[in-house]
Amino acid sequence: MPMVDLIPEAFCSILISMFERWTLELVCWLVHRIVKVFIAYMGFLPEGEYSPSLHHFEILKNITSPRFASKALIRSYQRSFNGFAAYLSQEEKRMLAGYEGIVSVFPCQKLHLQTTRSWDFMGFPITIERSPVGESNTIIGVIDSGIWPESESFSDEGLRPIPEKWKG
């Protein structure tokens, strides 16, 4: 049974009184479709005059309903690489993956901290004075030169022995 048939008209009536018209349209559009946030990676930014946001919007107009393309576009990435984040159904994701100029499409996911010692390794004190002004518009780059087991970052000096129950 399609999701559209599950939404009673009374529910939409209540929403109309609660939200502005465009918000209601977006809510109904999202409810009628099972959507997730996907990131479309398009590689390097082209040389010369190029408007990433306009290009991303035009792609979404061809993939989604032209009426909701602007609401589907969450973010245009236009500094370090070319790409965008958007609300898409699985079918739209599949169509986008085959679209010319799209390198890959993957779900947006929350990543979790994978290290316990980076703060110490980088020489930061446990407490440090924060500066929101100085910390904004800052890009932190990581250069991965491969694994070197003798590197100081792999040192286990000062740590307790590995628990016997650990395998691997």
Image (cartoon, helix red, strand yellow):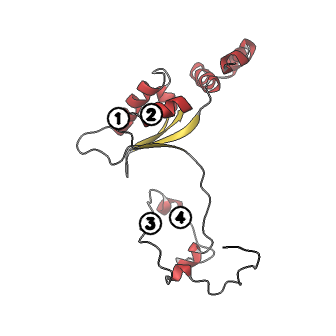
| Between 12 and 102, the one nearer to me in the picture | 102
Give, as a three-letter code, the residue at label 3: Val
Q: Are marks 2 and 4 in contact (CB under 8 Å)?
A: no
Determine whether 31 is above or below 38 in the image.
above
Circle 2 is placed at which residue position?
Answer: 96
Circle 1 is placed at which residue position?
Answer: 100
Quarter location, residue 116: bottom right
Q: Residue at image x 24%, y 40%?
A: 49
**Mark 2 or 4 closer to N-term?**
2
| Between 66 and 129, the one nearer to me in the picture | 66
In the picture, the disc for residue 131 is 4
* Left or right position of 133 against 49: right
| Between 36 and 55, the one nearer to me in the picture | 36
- Distance, label 2 to label 1, CA atoms, is 8 Å
Quarter location, residue 46: top left
* Left or right position of 40 against 12: left
Q: Element type at marker 2? A: helix
Determine whether 82 is above or below 73 in the image.
below
**Mark 3 or 4 closer to N-term?**
4
| Between 48 and 115, the one nearer to me in the picture | 115
Image quadrant holding the N terminus, namely top right
Determine whether 38 is above or below 69 in the image.
below
Q: Element type at marker 1? A: loop
In front: label 1 or label 3: 1
In the picture, the disc for residue 142 is 3
Q: Residue furthest front?
A: 168
